[in-house]
Each structure stands twice: as C-alpha cells, then as structure tokens.
C-alpha cells in the first residue's frame, strides 16, 4: 500500500473547485497529481483555476504551479520539478496510462458523466449527481449551508438548486450571464471595481451590465463563444481585491474534505 506522500491522485476537471482540491493536497505533501481538462475551459474564477494552463501553458494559484503536459510521457518530469501536471483530456484517456490511487471527480457538472468505482482504489466525487457507494466511494457535499463539506459514505449530495450562494446578501444578482448566444467581448477585467448598471462586456453586441456594486472577482476569457444564460462572471460586493486572487472559503472547505477523505482511508490502511 502506497504511503501518503507517494499517492498518485487524478482529478477530473481543473476549474475553481478542482484547483482548490489540488492546491490543498499539494500543501499536504501529496504532490503526484494530474488533472484532466477540456480543450477550451470557460472558467469564471480564472485567477484561481489551474485550467488556465490550457491556454497559457502554466498557471500559478497561491504559489502552486500547474504545467500543461503535451502528453502522458511529460507528466513524471513535471512532478520531478515540483509542479502539478495538467492534460487536455476531456475523455480521461490518461487513466488508461496512469492508474491513480485516488480519483477525484471535481467537474461539478451536476451529474455523473462517467465516473465509476473501478477507476481507483478511492474515488471521491464532488456535489450533485453522485451517490456514495454507487458512483463513488465517498461524495462531498458542495451546497452552501450547514452541510457544506460533509463527507457522505452513503446517499447522494443535495440536488442542484440553480441559485448561487449568497455573498454580502446578494445571490443571483451578483452573477453575470450571457443575454444570448454569441461571442463574449469583455470591457472590464478581473479585479476592477464596477457600479450597478455599468457595462462590463457584451455578447453579440448586447451589453452585459453589473446589477450590484462590487469587484469583478471572476470573468471568462475574452472572445469566447457562449450559450445564452452561461455564467460569464461574478461580482463580489465585499470589494476586496485579494479575494480575486485567492481560494474562496467554500473551495477551501470542500478541498479540506477531500484531504480528510484520503486520510480516512490511507491512514487506516497504513496504521
């Protein structure tokens, strides 16, 4: 049985929550981690999402860096240099080449896209769409509230509410959404202070305006084709610039639960 620091961890997804998980494990000295992402990720909280490495070749979140691997053969050297490995692999073919001890489904698609108990010795899934003991060994609750971060050994996570968590008393109002299908053009940037009614971008010529005062904590990349209703960004009414560049309270809680899930299994088996 592998020792804790020798565990190989695969993560499906490299967005905000997946990145927080990878960051937390890295800080706990579990560092042989590979992440699998789509070829054109549309992360909103880009400054804290390792999936940005798909576009830029590397991405650093709170002093931890992920490097884009051209293929599986490059992964070991990335690990040897002290970094996380990121692969463009939406179909998870990497799992046939690197068999992880732990697999985390952190896509947050609100449904199971194909994760199963057979994929690793320990399979952990985040949020709605998964039942512990059927789709994954353990499921982490992602809904804000009393049970956020709870590790489920049986049963399913709470269903998706479709309502963003409230920050500073604002929920849906803080989210920027595409008014129609088309190409998104940004006129403001992450970290900018905006006022209610101010235009922050457009989709197909239709303006996207802030509905509250605050700071642009997240915004998708410019010049992306988007579907109507897609989340384009979010405004934080607390207006703290550093919140744009650091992992959120929710993401830290969920990431801590993934670390605990790993310890529950491997501390027991290594005892």
Image (cartoon, rainbow, N blue to C red):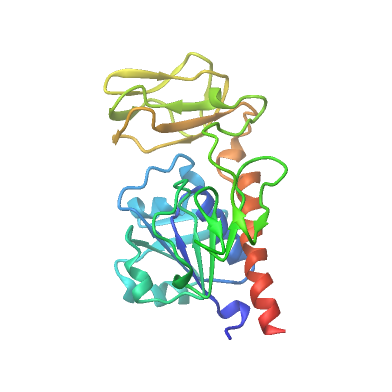
Which residue is located at x 36 percent, y 22 percent?
179
| Placement of the C terminus among the 4 image quadrants | bottom right
Residue 104 locus on image (x, y percent): 51, 62
- Vertical comparison of 134 with 178: above or below: below
Q: Describe residue 72's horizontal placement relative to residue 134 as left or right.
A: left
Between residue 11 and residue 210, name the one nearer to us.
Answer: 11
Any part of residue 64 in sight = yes
Q: Position of residue 249 (x, y in %)?
A: 66, 45
Q: Residue at x 33, y 57 (%)?
A: 90
* Front-most of residues 224 and 151: 151
| Quadrant occupied by the N terminus | bottom right
Q: Residue at x 64, y 62 (%)?
A: 153
Q: Position of residue 23 (x, y in %)?
A: 57, 59
Q: Is residue 134 above or below residue 268?
A: above
- Tell me residue 167's x, y (percent): 64, 31
Residue ranking furthest to the top: 197
- Residue 53 falls in image quadrant: bottom left
């Amino acid at each position: 049985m592998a020792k804790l620091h020798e565990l190989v961890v695969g993560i499906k997804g490299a967005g905000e929550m997946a990145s927080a998980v990878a960051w937390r494990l890295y800080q706990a000295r579990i560092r042989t981690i590979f992440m699998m992402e789509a070829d054109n990720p549309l992360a909103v909280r880009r400054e804290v999402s390792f999936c940005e490495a798909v576009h830029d070749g590397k991405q650093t979140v709170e002093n931890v860096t992920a490097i884009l691997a051209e293929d599986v053969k490059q992964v070991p050297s990335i690990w040897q240099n002290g970094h996380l490995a990121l692969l463009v692999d939406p179909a998870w073919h990497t799992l046939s080449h690197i068999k992880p001890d732990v697999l985390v489904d952190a896509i947050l698609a609100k449904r199971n896209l194909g994760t199963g108990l057979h994929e690793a010795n320990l399979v952990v899934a985040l949020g709605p769409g998964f039942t512990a003991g059927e789709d994954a060994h353990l499921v982490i609750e992602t809904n804000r509230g009393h049970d956020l971060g709870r590790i489920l050994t049986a049963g399913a996570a709470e269903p998706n509410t479709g309502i963003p968590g409230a920050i500073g008393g604002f929920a849906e109002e803080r989210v920027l959404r595409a008014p129609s299908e088309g190409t998104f053009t940004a006129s403001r940037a992450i970290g900018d202070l905006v006022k209610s009614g101010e235009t922050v971008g457009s989709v197909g010529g239709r303006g996207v305006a802030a509905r509250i005062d605050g700071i642009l904590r997240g915004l998708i990349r410019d010049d992306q084709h988007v579907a109507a209703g897609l989340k384009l960004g979010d405004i934080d009414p607390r207006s703290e610039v550093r919140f744009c560049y650091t992992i959120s309270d929710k993401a830290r809680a969920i990431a801590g639960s993934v670390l605990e899930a790993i310890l529950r299994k491997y501390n027991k088996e290594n005892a």
